[in-house]
Image (cartoon, grey):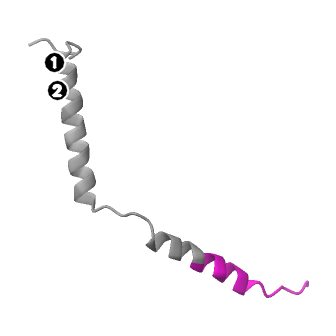
Amino acid sequence: MAKQKGNGLQSSAGLMRYFDADKKAITFKPIYVLIAGIIIGLAVLLISYFYGTWPLTL
């Protein structure tokens, strides 16, 4: 059986760098993303309605 090399320290260091980068990332609360999606969706619907590309005729 071949000897295993002790490279656990190297992989742990890479994992620590990943978590450090994750803490520095920009984060948004889920409610803000939901509200932004609703606002953008409504804006698209309004623009398509005013420009006559609305799929339904009222």
Image vertical order of residue 36 relative to residue 9, above or below = above
Q: Which residue occupies the extreme right position in the image?
A: 1
Please report the residue visible at 18 percent of the width from the left and 34 percent of the height from the top.
42
Please report the residue visible at 39 percent of the width from the left and 63 percent of the height from the top.
26
Assign a secondary structure to mark 1: helix
| Disc 2 crowd, CA 10 A, few/some/many (<14, 14-19, 20+) | few
Please report the residue visible at 52 percent of the width from the left and 75 percent of the height from the top.
19
Q: Position of residue 49 (x, y in %)?
A: 17, 19
21 vs 8, left or right, is left
Which span is picked out in magenta?
Answer: 1-16
Provide the residue designation for mark 1: 50
What amino acid is found at the position of numbered circle 2 in the picture? Leu
Provide the residue designation for mark 2: 46
Q: Position of residue 37 (x, y in %)?
A: 26, 44
Kindly indicate the quadrant of the structure image that contains residue 6: bottom right
Assign a secondary structure to mark 2: helix
Q: Position of residue 16 (x, y in %)?
A: 58, 80
Q: How many marks?
A: 2
Residue 10: assigned label: none
Magenta span includes 6: yes
Please report the residue visible at 44 percent of the width from the left and 73 percent of the height from the top.
23
Whether pointer 2 and pointer 1 mark residues with C-beta atoms closer than 8 Å, the reply is yes
